[in-house]
Image: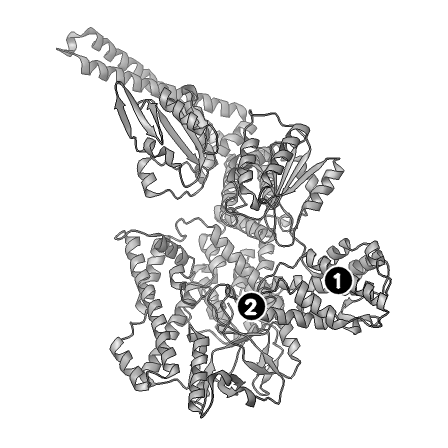
């Protein structure tokens, strides 16, 4: 995959007239026929997982003898072939190709992937060649001599054997054989002497070269980290050749020093930072953090400052532990997950062996520390004086994962240097200076980013003409014409949205790679913008300079961007006084709906791609509306029309979820009111509307008066949303790091297979027994098998039984596959990877519930079985654990049916659901209600519940979810349903997939929407994103 195998075959077979081709080459068939006919080697480069069927007869060696010659049937044509001389080499750039078993059986597969040690030796040779060229030249000459002499010995032995085998009569009577024997003996002695001297010389040279080993080691670590990044995003491909360029340049750029140790340190510094800048330029912001954290850890693991146990604790925490199998936590101030993290630290890290003990002992002290806004700035109780940055980060990652990113950056600054954590804005001019006419630029697009203006701005500066085309059906012809023009005249070509024109990119790659085919004007540059796409040509990525340019985050950045688009002419277009204020309000609303996206599902259920076009359309509508008012001499803005157009038509056009639409409507009610024209009006403290003025006055207001850091309140959320956002950031970081990890052996002596086998044995011992069919039928009959709730119960047991069977068979088969008793199928291999990373195997998730870790998932399985088993043996529960149902809607409909049947003359269609949160917890329920049911196990997100006053209240700081008391649900007639208090219609979400909310067909997590009591206006809770979940968050 690094192109080294390809280079070796080219060198090895060059003297035999090797011909190179590929499946994209128009002359592929001719090259194949020529090489077979003349018995020459053929090199078929850069294939994917599949081969062209035309090669089948060649790979099967289906050669037929015809007279003196051999022929082979290629599709519709008979071709000559020289089986003894013809060689076929096939290479692929895929790092982990999936060839079919049939193909693997026909060919010899050689893995040419460079190893860490191999690359280190190659890089060492480059360092020595640069720093001490005389040593490297001596080493190369020595190596050539040794190879030559060894070859000579083999030739002499072959000659001797040949003579011996052809000898007739006594050996001693043949003077030729005696002469060859004597000659062989003499030459063999000489060669042995030469080889002995060479071995001594090589040892001397090696020890002289060894002092430069640290540079090569760092280079090897860097390259393998770069290679791992392509596992996160297919667009992060970087070739070894590109890395070697950075490596060589770093040695030239590093500060000279006569003292070797200092010179080596300078090279390592320069190399690490240059690589970080080069690679970081093409990574999304969130992945730059992954890159620098991994780099710091790998460097320290290599230096043996930390071990793989530190790394595993940082990434996985205590995800593999079961909360019921470890020591009890000291109190409810610490969550189960965080307690498991602390226990795992004590098991893996000797320095923190006493951590759980210390937390239990100093309960209050640790609670105070844990409740701080920024615990990382304060002393860690009991441990402060023993901690370095790494162990401090591990404690904070365990107990306050939301602060992980902050301490991780401190750790990186300590391990590598402060300059690694400072953001480097994209400078297109310096990037352009690194390129040449055969180096394309690939701009990786993300939501809300578009580098077109930057590229056009640079072209203007360089006085370059830019030919631009947006790819899509039929646009290849235009793109080809522009490229021809650019190659000839040296103008720039901008190919936009190339994920819609992948075919043309393959053609472009070949054109740029074929150095001898055509002369390209040195001023020519090609700019490609594309979203990440799995079929994007690897070769093009590996020869290109990659750039990302993400939209800035924050209200201030959003308003800045909007007011860079607004011009003075636009502000002058409408004479009415309201116009300028309405433009500000519209831009503020646009920033709010965009900024809300970063908070995940509590912001918007679906992350809609609101962008500049929505703002343009709304401003155009407002402009026309005000001009119409001017014509009709109206006094006031028609607010109902404005709100409807903004929230239902322009932005609402993108919205697919009903709860999101409700939220958008409340936003427009909040922003588009007559009050915005009052002097000094503020949406929130610090977010005021400036008095009407010119464009510069507005821009100054944004720069000088808007807060640099936003509070979640500005987008309608409460203070905990920021906490949730930081937690999500940390979770994404850990998941992403896990994705990059090679599927090699685990640290700490045990292999991944040993660890997973232990997990299988442990989990298998806890898997519940199957439901007994006969007992089940008898119990259901006794309870009334035709009652709606009992029918729902039977279906639930069937679903659970399926999950139990799948879990049991997976755990058994996985143990046998690891032992080699049965074949390791793809499903089992994926299950092995998942369980090693403490994730849930994909097979278990089918038709079941989603959980972030295997420990939590398995706990839910046991709890479900426990509820149903108790129901079978003891009759209906007094209060139902609602999260334990896979079809919650079906169960609640069954409850409505039962209520309707028990009442005289009630039709099911007229019955609606009535809900009320009562003052009991699940343990306090002694009796089932007369009608309807009690349910428990729901968690409030975005708000809290006052048990005393029985209504929604603001959540306390750090309280992300709150367990709701028991809820009473029954059916009432639509006509009789009346409430004498305000209610908030609160959606309840189950979790069938990783996305947390959603009610569309693509996101089937919505269950039902009970009405719960509130004293505040419902709009407040709508904008807070308040919902009920069937699981306590993550």
Whether residue 750 is visible: no
Q: In this view, does 470 lie above or below 780?
A: above
Q: How many residues crowd mark 2 within 10 Å: few (<14), some (14–19), many (20+)?
A: some
At x 37%, y 33%, the residue is 55
Please report whichever mark, 1 or 2, sits nearer to the chain's N-terminal start.
2
Q: Is there CB contact under 8 Å for labels 1 and 2?
A: no
Of residues 1027 and 182, the one drawn nearer to the viewer in this rendering = 1027
- To which residue does mark 2 refer? 381
Q: How many residues crowd mark 1 within 10 Å: few (<14), some (14–19), many (20+)?
A: some
Distance of label 1 from label 2 (alpha carbons)? 59 Å
The percent position of residue 93, horizontal first and vertical second, equals 46, 38
The percent position of residue 429, horizontal first and vertical second, equals 70, 39
- To which residue does mark 1 refer? 621
Residue furthest to the left in view is: 169
The percent position of residue 149, horizontal first and vertical second, equals 36, 19
Q: Would you say 869 lies left or right of 530 here? A: left
Of residues 658 and 836, the one drawn nearer to the viewer in this rendering = 658
At x 55%, y 57%, the residue is 388
Q: Is residue 733 above or below residue 435?
A: below
In which image quadrant can residue 764 be found?
Answer: bottom left
């Amino acid at each position: 995959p690094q192109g080294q195998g390809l280079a070796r075959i080219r060198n090895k077979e060059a003297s035999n007239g090797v011909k190179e081709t590929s499946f994209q080459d128009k002359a592929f068939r001719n090259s194949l026929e020529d090489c077979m006919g003349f018995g020459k080697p053929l090199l078929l480069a850069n294939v994917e997982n599949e081969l062209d069927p035309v090669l089948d007869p060649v790979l099967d060696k289906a050669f037929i003898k015809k007279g003196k010659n051999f022929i082979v049937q290629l599709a519709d044509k008979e071709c000559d072939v020289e089986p003894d001389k013809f060689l076929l080499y096939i290479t692929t750039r895929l790092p982990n190709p999936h060839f079919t078993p049939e193909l693997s059986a026909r060919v010899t597969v050689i893995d040419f992937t460079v190893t860490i040690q191999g690359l280190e030796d190659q890089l060492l040779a480059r360092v020595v060649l640069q720093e001490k060229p005389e040593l490297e030249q001596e080493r190369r000459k020595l190596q050539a001599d040794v190879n030559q002499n060894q070859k000579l010995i083999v030739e002499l032995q072959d000659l001797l054997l040949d003579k011996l085998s052809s000898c007739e009569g006594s050996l001693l009577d043949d003077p030729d054989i005696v002469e060859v024997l004597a000659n062989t003996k003499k030459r063999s002695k000489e060669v042995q002497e030469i080889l002995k001297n060479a071995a001594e010389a090589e040892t001397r040279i090696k020890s002289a070269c060894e002092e430069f080993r640290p540079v090569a080691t760092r280079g090897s670590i860097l390259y393998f980290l770069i290679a791992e990044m392509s596992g996160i995003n297919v667009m992060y491909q970087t070739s070894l050749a590109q890395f070697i360029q950075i490596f060589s340049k770093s040695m030239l750029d590093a500060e000279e020093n006569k003292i070797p140790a200092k010179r080596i340190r300078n090279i390592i510094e320069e190399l690490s930072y240059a690589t970080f800048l080069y690679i970081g330029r093409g990574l999304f912001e969130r992945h730059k953090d992954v890159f620098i954290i991994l780099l710091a850890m790998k460097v320290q693991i290599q230096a043996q400052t930390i071990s793989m146990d530190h790394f595993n604790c940082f990434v996985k925490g205590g995800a593999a532990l079961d909360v019921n199998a470890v020591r009890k936590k000291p109190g409810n101030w610490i969550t189960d997950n965080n307690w498991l993290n602390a226990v795992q630290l004590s098991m893996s890290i000797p320095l923190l062996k006493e951590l759980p003990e210390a937390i239990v002992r100093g309960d209050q002290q640790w609670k105070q520390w844990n409740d701080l806004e920024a615990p990382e700035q304060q002393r860690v109780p009991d441990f402060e004086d023993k901690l370095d940055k790494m162990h401090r980060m591990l404690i904070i990652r365990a107990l306050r994962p939301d602060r992980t990113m902050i301490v991780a950056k401190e750790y990186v600054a300590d391990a590598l240097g402060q300059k690694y954590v400072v953001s480097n804005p994209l400078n297109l001019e310096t990037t352009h200076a690194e390129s040449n006419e055969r180096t394309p630029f690939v701009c990786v697009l993300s939501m809300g980013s578009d580098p077109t203006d930057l590229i056009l701005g640079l072209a203007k500066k360089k006085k370059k003409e830019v030919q631009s085309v947006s790819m899509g059906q039929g646009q290849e012809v235009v793109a080809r014409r522009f490229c021809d023009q650019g190659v000839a005249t040296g103008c720039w070509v901008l190919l936009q949205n190339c994920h819609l024109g992948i075919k043309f990119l393959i053609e472009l790659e070949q054109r740029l790679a074929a150095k001898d085919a055509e002369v390209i004007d040195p001023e020519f540059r090609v700019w490609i913008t594309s979203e990440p796409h799995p079929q994007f040509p690897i070769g093009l990525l590996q020869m290109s300079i990659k750039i990302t340019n993400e939209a800035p985050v924050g209200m201030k950045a959003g308003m800045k961007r909007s007011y860079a688009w607004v011009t003075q002419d636009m502000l002058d277009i409408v004479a009415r006084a309201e116009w300028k204020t309405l433009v500000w309000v519209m831009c503020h609303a646009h920033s709010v709906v965009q900024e809300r996206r970063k908070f995940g599902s509590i912001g918007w259920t679906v992350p809609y791609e609101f962008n500049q076009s929505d703002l343009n359309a709304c401003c155009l509508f407002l402009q026309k509306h005000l001009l119409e008012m001017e014509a009709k001499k109206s006094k006031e803005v028609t607010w109902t029309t404005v709100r409807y157009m903004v929230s239902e038509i322009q932005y609402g056009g993108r919205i697919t979820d009903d709860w999101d639409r409700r939220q958008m409507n409340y936003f427009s009610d909040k922003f588009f009111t007559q009050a915005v024209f009052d002097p000094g009006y503020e949406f929130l403290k610090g977010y005021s509307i400036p008095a009407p003025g010119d464009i510069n006055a507005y821009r100054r207001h944004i720069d000088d008066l808007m807060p640099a850091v936003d509070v979640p309140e500005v987008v309608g959320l409460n203070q905990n949303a920021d906490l949730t956002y930081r937690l999500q950031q940390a979770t994404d970081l850990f998941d992403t790091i896990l994705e990059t990890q090679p599927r090699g052996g685990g640290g700490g002596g045990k292999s991944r297979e040993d660890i997973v086998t232990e997990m299988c044995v442990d989990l298998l011992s806890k898997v519940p027994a199957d439901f007994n069919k006969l007992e089940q039928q008898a119990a259901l009959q006794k309870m009334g098998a035709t009652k709606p709730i009992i029918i729902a119960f039977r279906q639930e047991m069937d679903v659970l039984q399926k999950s139990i069977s799948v879990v049991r068979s997976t755990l058994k088969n996985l143990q046998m596959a690891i032992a080699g008793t049965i074949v390791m199928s793809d499903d089992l291999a994926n299950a092995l990877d998942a369980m090693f990373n403490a994730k849930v195997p994909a097979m278990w998730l089918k038709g079941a519930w989603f959980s972030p870790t295997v420990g939590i998932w398995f706990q839910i399985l046991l709890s479900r079985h426990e509820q149903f088993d108790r129901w079978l043996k003891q009759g209906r529960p007094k209060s139902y654990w609602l999260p334990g149902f896979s079809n919650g809607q079906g169960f609640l409909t069954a409850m409505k049916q039962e209520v309707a049947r028990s009442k005289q003359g009630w039709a099911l269609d007229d019955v609606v659901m009535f809900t009320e949160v009562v003052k009991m917890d699940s343990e306090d329920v002694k009796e089932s209600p007369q009608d309807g049911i009690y349910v428990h196990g729901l968690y409030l997100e975005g708000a809290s519940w006052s048990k005393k006053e029985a209504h929604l209240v603001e959540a306390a700081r750090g309280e992300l979810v709150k367990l709701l008391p028991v809820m009473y649900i029954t059916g009432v007639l639509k006509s009789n349903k009346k409430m004498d208090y305000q209610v908030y219609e609160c959606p309840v979400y189950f979790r069938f997939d990783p996305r947390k909310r959603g009610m569309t067909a693509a996101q089937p997590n919505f269950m039902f929407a009970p009405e719960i009591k509130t004293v505040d206006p419902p709009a407040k809770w709508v904008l807070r994103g308040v919902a009920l979940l069937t699981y306590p968050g993550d």
